[in-house]
Amino acid sequence: MGVGRQTTMQDGWVSASDPGRLCSFDYEAIQRPTKALLHQAARFLYIRRGRGVIEIDGTPYELVPNTIVAITPWEISDVTEVSETLQFIKIIYDYQYLNTILKGLAGYSNEGTELLRFLSAEPVAYLDSVQTAYVDELMEQLKRELGVESTRVAHEEEPFSQLYVCTKLIELMISYRRFVMASRGEAERTRPQSRENSIFSYLYAHSSEKLSLSQVAEVFSLSDSALSKQIAEQTGLSFPRLVSSIRTEKASDYLIYTDLTLDEIASLVGFTDAPHLSRHFSQRAGIPPNQYRKIYGKLNSKLNRSDKNVAFAITDYVYKHYAEEGLNASAVAAEFGVSATELNRLLLYYAEKNFETLLNDCRINKACELLASTDFLVIDVAVEVGYGNVKTFNMNFFKFKQMTPTEFRRRITLQKPDGSETGGKSGARR
């Protein structure tokens, strides 16, 4: 990956339609090299057809049919070559939840930890014909249980579905390790060296500790300024904001899957205490952690036709009132006579976005139009679309568009219905 090349940060949710899911199954195809991606959620890519090269944290690996790629949280992947269209299965799963399960297995906690470390140390496995047949069947089992994510067709869970998926993921991980070891003719007891050469992987692994810029810079033999610059160039975030983002991402798993107190979760993910966790979580998620837990703990409820009508009416309302500063879930919920929890449940089921994501998506899309078609100052654009300050606007703009508003104005054109274009102004006002 080239020095100074900005990396697109992917969302940390396993499923766009259901943040509470443990795992999702989907198909994907790549015809040309991609942008570098910083993954917040772990995934397996099972290459079925095609040829190319993928870099994992800067190390290149050949992609051929019957290859499995294991990507753990906060690793950077970059498909740098595609000589033949790559077609693959994508399994995105909740790494932190699996980590908790494996650590909780009596007598096997060390092996469970080692299993996850192996995925980071050995990110690619090349399968023989027997191993391929085994993985094909395992993938088919996951597909039948999970459905295909991109179809967006509601998939009714069978009893014990999460337990079934959890065991299949662990089976895949164990098989993956055995395949890699067998290909080398090495004994199963052989331990690979940890490959913590990625700054982001290091931060993820050590997020529960007291992390400072100087400490991490020393680990990677960098100056404080060089580390800070590298993080900013690749993610658009400062060091403290990146660490906070990693910690809140981990916290969201504990909120969904456990009944741990906020103080207990804060201790596990690296925040000082519950208020510290609540402040950072609310800034990132838009809602307090206890409310987040209530909302996403009810995603499996059935919805009827009248619910669908309400969800569409709420979506329409947001698109018409997005510019109102202070617009929030509670106010809109009151407008429609439902609770904020119910409002988010409806939106997640039908719009595949919670209220905050829907609102910010609407605001940023309108901001893009204004940036490309007018000479408004960036701060004026922020106010026009409903943001109270330019800092919040810039943060959300980068999250949705992976560039600053000023960069967008320089690089992006807006095509009008008559085919004419505006935007891409190198001398536009800031």
Image: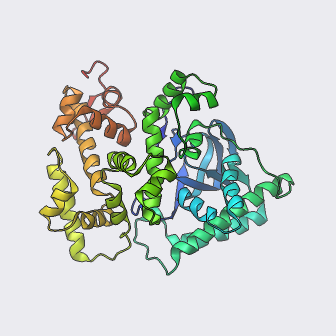
Left or right of 130 in this view: 32? left
Question: Which residue does the image show at 49% across and 80% down from the upper left?
Answer: 158
Query: Most extreme residue toward the left, as rendered?
Result: 335
Question: Which residue does the image show at 24% across and 70% down from the upper left?
Answer: 308
What is the x, y in percent for residue 370? 21, 34
Asked if residue 12 can be seen in this view, the reply is: no
> Up-down: is 153 above or below 325?
below
Query: Most extreme residue toward the top, as rendered?
Result: 427
What is the x, y in percent for residue 1? 59, 32
Could you say which is closer to the camera, residue 283 or residue 33? Answer: 283
Q: How many badges with numbers are in the image?
A: 0
> Up-down: is 83 above or below 222?
below
Question: Which residue does the image show at 51% across and 38% down from the upper left?
Answer: 35
Question: Which residue does the image show at 75% across and 64% down from the upper left?
Answer: 131
Indicate the quadrant containing the C terminus: top left, top right, bottom left or bottom right. top left
Q: How is the image coloured?
A: rainbow
